[in-house]
Image (tube, coloured by chain):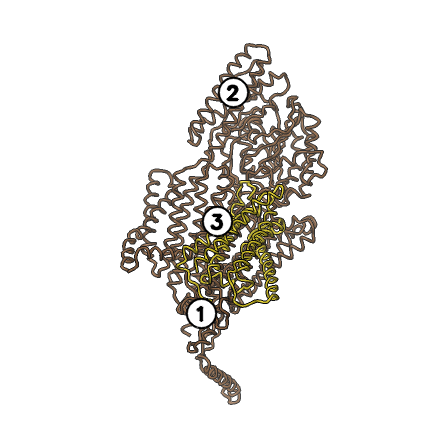
Amino acid sequence: MQRWPVLLFLAWACFLFFSGIGLFTSGFLLMRIELTNRSSCSDPLAAPAWAGQGLAPGACWMPQRVPKAVLLIIDALAFEFARFDPAKARPRPYENKLGFLHQLAGSQPRHARLYRFRADPPTTTMQRIKGLTTGSLPTFIDVGSNFASYAIEEDNLLGQLVQNGRRVVFMGDDTWDGLFPQKFFRSYFFPSFNVKDLHTVDDGILQHLYPTVDGGEWDLLIAHFLGVDHCGHKHGPDHPEMAKKLAQMNEMLRSLVDHLGSDTLLLVAGDHGMTETGDHGGDSEKEVNAALFVYSKTPLFGAHRPEEPETIPQVNLVPTLALLLGVPIPYSNIGEVMAELFSGDGGDASAALRQLSAYRLNARQVDRFLHSYSLAAQDLPAERLRHLRELFSAALEEHDRLLAHVQEGLPASPELEARLRRLVGRFQRYLREARAVCMESWARFHPLRMVAGCALIAASCLLCYVASELAAALDFPYRSRLLYPLLWGLAVAAVLGLGQLLTREGPDLVLVSAWAAAASQLAFFWPSWGRRPRRAHLAGGQPPAASAGLWQRLRAWQGPALPMGLLFLRCCAMFSDSFVVAEARVAPFLLASLATLLVGKLHWRGRLTAPEAPKQPPGAAFYQKESWQLLGLLAVLLACLRLSGLFHQCREEIPRCQPSPCLAPLSSLQSTQAKNLFYLLCVASLAGLVCAVRRWLRHYGNLNSASPLVLFVRWAFPLLAVWIACYWAVTSGAEDTLGKLQELVQVALVGFPRAVYGLASLGLLLALWTPVTVFVKDSRESVGPIVTPYQGAPSSQAELLHVIPQIYRRMQESLKSQLDRGHRRATVAAYGLGSVYSAALVIVLTVLGFLLLILHSERMSLSFLLLFLEAFVLLRIHACVVSLAGDAGDLPVRRNGPPFVVPWYAVTAWVFAATQFFYSTGHQPTFPAIHWNAAFVGFQQGHSTHLLPAVLVGANTFASHILFAVGCPLLLLWPFVCEAPNSQRRKLKKELREELQEEEEPMMEMRLRESPERFSAALLQLGLKYLFVLGAQLLACVWAAMILRRHLMVWKVFAPKFLFEALGFMVSSICLLLGIFLVMRVDYAVSAWFERLQPR
Amino acid sequence: MKDTEIKRLLSAHIVCVFSIILTTVVPPLFLENFSVLGTHLIWLCICSICVTTVNIILYIILKPNPSSKRISFAHKVTKFLKCCVFFFISCILFHGIIVLYGAPLIELVLETFLFAVLLSTFTTLHCLCMLGPNIQAWIRVFSKNGAMSIWDNSLQITTMCSIVGAWLGAFPIPLDWDRPWQIWPISCSLGATFGYVAGLIIAPLWIYWNRKQLTYKSR
């Protein structure tokens, strides 16, 4: 058996896809360039002094309006939380809880005001902090670095304050520590990692807040509360816990205002909102809508008060705060000042003048930024920039004219005021347009790379298809199809890499791998290009005409037409945003159609009906027993598909969608009875899984031997289940009631998951070390001496007593063996040899299942049970169909067992099922739907590295991809495993007809071992087919993202879908390699086992 | 012989098609506010009833599978009752299958059930008329070489077309076009109806084109 070439070929095919994905991604998801320029007081932007408005010595750019400010960031303070509607009779837990804000705004309208604070997506906390301090827009791809905070390189508000000698004091979320290392005059950081912990950060802040405020040693005080956000993550907004948290915030604000001096500005801001499930990260209306509340003990605002709270973008806070505090606006800011904060007291004209000077500074700063940015990068369209420039210079000219006007000392007139107002409007328009241009362009594409990436992926798909056809023949030309392409690819990579090393600093890895992939693909396709004429020549030698050849080819296509057609439909669905949104229901629909059509086709071809018996009346047909079994399996499959729909997560695009209640952790349930009931159900599903697997193994005799793996199944499976159940019990128990046991609970929360991880890894290692689960009973005669020599003294009595029983036993044995010989020769009986490959795979799958299960919320265990059931039913249907379809074949097919080729329908159904369970394990291809909680299972205190949390979250997200990809070789093995009863049935039939046939034992999987060449070819073919189906879906996604890159929904639907699909492909392909590797490892071990058996 | 049979088949099918067209045209004359999309449930009832009666009348007139034996009245009654039971079971089965394919389980039960009735009318009723309540015969007809007359062939074609039509009708549901016909089960029932009509038209034509190849086993 060729083990390494097969694995190498598959790995190479995966690499081809990966390089295509890399190339496309580099063209599709471009990043914004960060400028390192900084603003400073000496910049010539500063306004010429107005008449009677000299700059105070300490201030720069603009006179300082407020000496001190407190910025309270309440994480995830959505606008609904801050609004107070007295008319509401029965407010929900999160409504009407911040009454103090309402009271302030009502009683002192010139001192306080509430705004809608629109966050720019992505709405993750770190991105928002970046936006709130630099005034710039984080780009799409930055999302990936959520777990590790990197220091902000760009010019920012804190940097400006520090540069100008202000004291910034911080308390709260320690994300800021990573973003602004050593910037704070004093700081109190508290860990933010543990989302389950509602109180540590808030209590810590409250402990330090009032003393610090009273101490007065600060100019800007920032406090970042996390309780509300964590409460949302843990319980969702609609929970009494949220009401408690918001009430706490309300009290905090009330007493803080008492402590504030009259010269201090208070800003209360939410960095983002939250969805109905309490998550955030995306760009839905609920996530984007945060609140901002401004208050000062001296009047700030004009008399005019808007009816409905104004909506302002979050970046606007940066220039506003900078100018109010009298420091330069950060260099890369694209926000706009909040004009009403600059009006202050005095007449309308003077207020407008002050606003105007703020706008002018702001506009000049943005213009300067756009200019230097366009020099550094070519993303911004030149035409738009020119237009902006014109707008800006026109406004500036008008400004200068007006300035001259005012300096002449003309009295304020209504006409002047109107001109001032118009000018402010022009600056506003400029600033808004500039911001829009930036927003549009920071999602710019590299078309050439995108097309090339697409082409690479398409070529890889074609390669998989061609190679899977080639693998059907026994002699796969590894030399010409694997070795030469690899050499070509390596050569090209080496040349390019060296070339780039010489010319530039570092090689562009993406480009080099793409060129290498392209070269090796060409080398692969080269032989088929040359061989085609020869083949045509060979075909021409046969009598049938060309049309017959075409007909034959069409006939050959009839088999895969059905799955290919459905796959094509699924790929088409990727191009419509509605279908991507509804994919959770589309995938099971297509899978159900595939299964039903498959059975229908079998029926149509008459394979389900029994061959006509003489007794039967003419014109009637009966189903065989197996056909009824098949129909039953189909019904179970359909039921599984429908039930799995109960576990779906919601996308915000679907209105009136209720997310599955099973997604929430058990601890969020309020009724104890329901909690207990669900807990028991979850534990029952765990127990059911363990029992089912053990039963299956026992049925095929793989549970008898004393090898370490079998012992693991016997003892560690129940242990794993018990540990998981204990972990669930601890997490779902109400935290507050335990009181004294708190420490023990903490230990249990960490200990149980880690123990599960450890034991499961041990199981996986065991499966790799000794994968053979065969129990051997050797009934051959032992060759040893008949009587063991007697060591004692040669006294006759004792010797006789020693020898006689031995002789007696020996006689007994030989007599028995002679009696047995009448029936059969002495043999080695091996139990479980027929299913040795699948047994190892099933064990590994179960262990993986446990690992993935603990990463999900408790009630998802039901979904996992469904997953295993559905996979089992799919395999049974496949085996049934193979046996029924083969039934009508001629005798050689019967005797050789099932074919070594896994048909397309099975592979397609398997991939569809993987997709379906991606959704049914509560996932959606959007960022807010990622289960971040998974990173903290067993790591309550957070992580020091970011590899481990990424692995945990990734395993959670792609759980079904992992399970189905590892289990993929079962598609090849299962028909062999299920062979046993069939051949018995046939045997019976045969005995009826002719009793000449020798008694035939079911060979099951040993058929595979008998022809190792065909086995390895079949594995290669299966892997390639799986890669092809996955690759076709990926290709459709990539294509859709490329074609629809200007679509309204590209960042909301297509880009996330592409990212999830690409990641899913990578995970699946790697797991597929692992699954095939495991089968080969078993094969190797079985060979070794046979060799050990022989010499005895 | 065969040509006359095909003509009879064609005429029967044309009557069926007309009856369906009439169900959309006539009711507005009697009922206020009637439209296929607006009052879909009423149309579903009317269409099912109309197709049922037309089919039964056609069956009585044409007698596609004449049996030589004389059948007693009691036997006829039991056969009729059996047919009714079969029809009801098929409605429930279709309902179950539709739900398994993703239709809402609790809401819109009436809509789903009427759709199941419509599908049964297009498929099961035909089978009942042609073959009687005889499952074995049904299994035989819906296989590759099972057709024993052109009536069996037309049965195969119309049934498959109706079901494929209903299947295709599910595809526009997720689209965000906000059309009235995208509401469950309108698109599916319209798809089934169009499929049925297409099947009625295709069947005689297909049989006519392939009349040379079609040879039937003797009974």
Camera-near label (2 vs 3) is 3
Identified by mark 2, the residue type is Ala
Q: Position of residue A1022 (x, y in %)?
A: 42, 57
Label 1 SS: loop
Residue appearing at x 67%, y 44% in the figure: A239
Which residue lies under the disc numbered 3? A1064
- The crowding category of the residue bearing disc 3, from other C-alpha atoms within 10 Å (few below 14, some 14 to 19, many at least 20), is many
Which residue lies under the disc numbered 2? A46
Indicate which disc, 3 or 1, sits on the residue closer to the N terminus: 1
Q: Which mark is residue A699?
A: none
Alpha-carbon span between mark 1 and mark 2: 89 Å
* Residue A217 appears in the figure: no
Identified by mark 1, the residue type is Met
Which residue lies under the disc numbered 1? A1003
Q: Nearer the viewer, residue A88 or A1063?
A: A88
Chain identifier matching the brown colour in the rendered picture: A
